[in-house]
Image (tube, grey):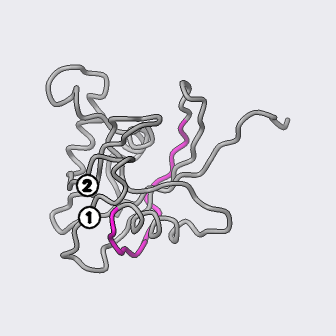
Amino acid sequence: MASDGPHPRVGVAAMIRNAQGEFVMSKRLGGHGAGDWQFPGGHLEFGESIFACAERETLEETGLKVKATKLVGVTNTVFPEPGKHYITLFVACEREDDKAEPELLEPLKCQGWHWITWDKVCGWCDHHNETAGEWATNKCFMPIRNLVRENRVLQI
């Protein structure tokens, strides 16, 4: 049965890891998930490949030139409050220059880029509803929480 309501959108998240096993992440500003940690990423454009999207979004948001290498996870997330539904594709990416650092190129969308360990991300997700200390200020975007719940051990 066809629905006349809003349709799911496809989001692509670039998981860029350094030699220490940390990932590039930032806190979202505005919109749904404001204040939550996220990976670089955005919407898949018509006719665009998943890997090309991860590479494009990373360059636009961080200035990093990356090579997408592997699809590492898929989540199905409904955001009830804003009435949005996303299929998010998580893509492992490698920096072309291992010494290159992310730059804040979209200051109205995020607070700056940081290197965060996967263990820390998992901890933030595990304690998402707590309101004290580190847990109160470090929450992850819902698709990342779903990824952690479904794929705690990443195969990157």
Classify 10 Å Cα crowding around label 1: few (below 14), some (14-19), many (20 and above): some
Residue 125 falls in image quadrant: top left
Q: What type is the residue that disc 1 sits on?
A: Pro
Q: Furthest-top residue in view? A: 131
Query: What residue appears at the point 50 percent right and 56 percent down from the top-left corner?
Result: 12
**In terms of secondary structure, where does tag 1 sit?**
loop
Query: Where is mark 2, residue-wise?
Result: 113
The quadrant of the rendering that contains the C terminus is: bottom left
Classify 10 Å Cα crowding around label 2: few (below 14), some (14-19), many (20 and above): many
Residue 85 placed where, x, y %?
60, 38
Nearest the viewer among 51 and 29 is 29
As for residue 106 lying within the magenta part, the answer is no
First in sequence, mark 1 or 2: give its number: 1
Measured in 3D between alpha carbons, the distance from the residue under mark 1 to the one under mark 2, in whole angstroms, is 6 Å
Describe residue 48's horizontal placement relative to residue 2 as left or right. Answer: left
Q: Furthest-right residue in view? A: 1
Marks 1 & 2, CB-CB < 8 Å contact: yes
Query: What residue appears at the point 43 percent right and 39 percent down from the top-left corner?
Result: 146
Q: What type is the residue that disc 2 sits on?
A: Trp
Q: Which residues are magenta?
A: 62-77
**In terms of secondary structure, where does tag 2 sit?**
loop
As for residue 68 lying within the magenta part, the answer is yes
Residue 62 placed where, x, y %?
33, 63
Query: Where is mark 1, residue-wise?
Result: 102
Query: What residue appears at the point 59 percent right and 69 percent down from the top-left corner?
Result: 49
Residue 9 placed where, x, y %?
62, 47
> Does the magenta stretch mainly form a helix, a strand or a loop?
strand
48 shown above or below 40: below
Nearest the viewer among 50 and 148 is 50
Describe residue 65's horizontal placement relative to residue 85 as left or right. Answer: left
Residue 149 falls in image quadrant: top left
